[in-house]
Image (cartoon, rainbow, N blue to C red):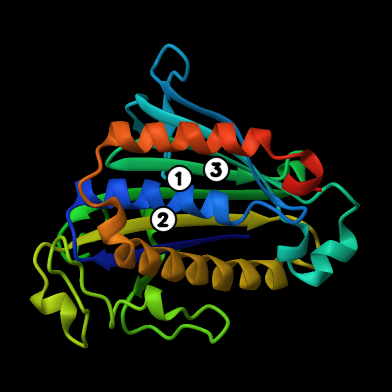
Amino acid sequence: MVFIKEFRILLPMTPDECRIGHLYAIDEASRDETGGGEGVEIVENVPFDATRFPDVHTISGQPKTAKGQYTHKIYHISSKVPAFIRLLAPKGSLEIHEKSWNCFPFVHTEISNPDYMKDGMKFMIDTIYAEGKGKEENIHELPPNLLSKRQIDFIDIANDPVSKTDYKEDEDPTKFTSEKTGRGPLVEDWKETQDPIMCCYKLVSFEFKWWGLQTKVESVMKRAERRLLLNLHRKLFCRMDQWHGMTIEDIRAMEEKTQRDLQKVPDHARYA
């Protein structure tokens, strides 16, 4: 059984600004999540073109222009998966591989556990950054058989509830005003008043093949993905004054520094 959900996240910025902000937030998270026996291992972060990857296929099967930035990361996250997964999985198996082809404004991401689950888990995300309020009916060009399965979930970074454990006052869009742009705070009807405004269309496809656990794991993954996207984009907006005005060259230099710094961290401190 495969579930397909399209998350639509509205943000008070342009797609080009979101590109910078998203990469900044991901790099910051890589640093914050590394340490104490777990973290992010950056295997590759390099430009790519058709000579290396002939094409990049979306969830719908549509090919995309293969030119952009390729990243391969390994997440060592044994304490951050559900307890029943830890009980089933042998030591050392909880390493999640993330491969991403960033062909802005399109990004294709594949997440796997090749050492243990192998083909037992298929997790893909297609992202398109576009201007507007998320009204595009089929921006991912899904064929009828997949379109009929797709669920749409709008994420409101200001008004959707956040758990007590996730809440941080400095990442609350209802309390943040950007000194550089004057945007915010995001109050009740902010989607009708903010200009510019754009939407991240994130199409998530997930299949889990362990018999007897499919329903439970898929339910966990749905909740986890929504929580991740909500918190990430709240942070992205509230960190605007840190990344606004940066260029893609600035971001690549920051990513290279992060990769070098993480390689210097001793293995026992970086991940188990």
Q: Is residue 271 visible?
A: no
Q: Which mark is residue 59?
A: 1
Q: Residue at x 32, y 84 (%)?
A: 159
Q: Quadrant of residue 89?
A: bottom right
Q: Residue at x 31, y 80 (%)?
A: 158
* Label whose residue precedes the other's in the sequence (2 or 1): 1
Q: Which mark is residue 203?
A: 2
**Dot 3 crowding, Cα within 10 Å, few <14, some 14–19, many 20+:** some
Q: 199 left or right of 265?
A: left
Q: Are marks 2 and 1 in contact (CB under 8 Å)?
A: yes
Closer to viewer: mark 2 or mark 1: 2
Query: Whole-Å distance between the Cαs marked 1 and 3?
Result: 10 Å
Mark 3 lies on residue: 110
- The image quadrant where one finds the N terminus is bottom right
Query: Whole-Å distance between the Cαs marked 2 and 3?
Result: 12 Å
Q: What's under tag 3, amino acid-wise?
A: Glu
Q: Nearer the viewer, residue 15 or 1?
A: 15
